[in-house]
Image (cartoon, rainbow, N blue to C red):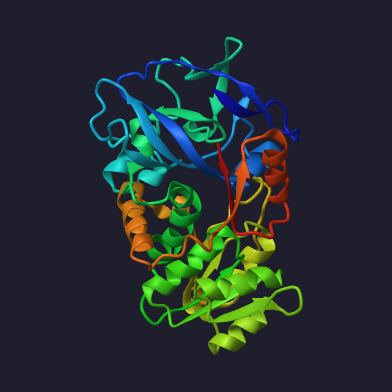
Amino acid sequence: MKAALLHQIKEDLVIEDIDIDLPPRRDEILIRNAACGFCHSDRGIQLGRRAKLDAPLLLGHEAAGIVEEVGSEVTYVKPGDHVVLCASAFCGTCRWCMQGQPQHCENKNHSRPDGTPRLTLDGGPVEPFVGLGGFAEQMLVHERAVVKVPEDMPLDRAALLGCAVITGLGAARHAAKVQVGDTVAVIGCGGVGLNAIQGARLAGASRIIAVDRLAAKLDLATTFGATDVVDASTTDPVEAVRDLSGGGVNHALEVVGIASTIEQAFAMLDARGTATVVGAAPNAQTEVRIRALEFLREKRLQGCVMGSARFRLDIPLYAQLYLDGRLKLDELLSEKIPFDNNAVNTAMNQLDSPLVARAVMTP
């Protein structure tokens, strides 16, 4: 099959023919890829800003497709089922899974227990990012990395559910636990931030303040439910948010992942407010400075990974909300990218200065 491989950090992806170890093993699923989103996490790995993985590496994790073949013990799906893949796979038996926190699963089955590669190039192993490898025509994954969605759910929209949507909505619903009437600020209005905004809207927030430096993103934020916008390129976002909210917000969701915006999120809180860091910091050297006296106002700073989601529960719900007209995905899908070298690499480069909400590759 054809796959877009990363051979060296900071180099372009190269579409090549690789081999899949078939048939699927007893707990594996072969999927025909329908769409895969371009996410900042993929770009961060490509540029070496996050954990370095063995090359050649097959990036892409925000994917959806149709099951082609299943292993002998797979009962959850069958050939022909439509599925969304998720980086938050689970084992179901570790201490975190047993506590209902599968995002922290200690055995996500990203690789086979015996170390045999699922994918190879010229006989050598190809590493699929987070066990998925979505920038390819097919994906061979563990059965617990997928969730079924209705067949009338468009697969290019469904792909977005596996990362941007569950991360943003989950940050508002599960991590921050936004309640009816709460005031919310969202810093960063990309794909994940827009979903944090509509997550706050669905939760019943009374005021949702979108903060970004790009006017086009702020305009889009109002479509997703923002009641107010703050252009951080022309005004102090902390002062603006505190003025708009009458002293500070109940929740600030930071979706950028840098120290300055994390500090801003904490500063714009009212007493007993919570700042939730959703954005992935580019490296381990990111340090946040907060005055200890601020904690006397009972303010909290917390993290969130993958929207604290239980994806086999959340993704079917979000698919149904979309089909019912309550969840915006058409507006989120801004561009479809053909599967060729130039188009894929252009889309990856554009993640550095994104002017669109979410682009997807369609093999």
Which quadrant would residue 14 be assigned to in this image?
Answer: top right
In the image, 170 versus 155, the foreground residue is 155
Q: Is residue 168 left or right of residue 121?
A: left
Q: Looking at the image, which is closer to me, 270 or 65?
A: 65
Q: What residue is shown at x 67% (from left), y 39% (from top)?
A: 344
Who's the residue at 27% across and 32% down the image? 78
User: Looking at the image, which is closer to me, 92 or 335?
Assistant: 335
- The single residue placed furthest to the top in the displayed view is 123
Quarter of the picture containing the C terminus is top right
Residue 187 horizontal/vertical position (percent): 60, 68
Specify whether residue 241 is in view: yes
Q: Is residue 20 left or right of residue 68?
A: right
Q: Is residue 181 above or below residue 41?
A: below
Where residue 115 appears, x then y in whole percent?
A: 46, 16
Q: Position of residue 17 (x, y in %)?
A: 60, 20
Specify whether residue 55 is in view. no
Please give the name of the residue rendered at 53% of the width and 58% of the height, measured from the top-left corner. 278
Number of marks:
0
- Residue lying at 51% horizontally and 42% vertically, measured from the top left: 35
| Front-most of residues 239 and 181 | 181
- Residue 258 position in % (x across, y down): 66, 58
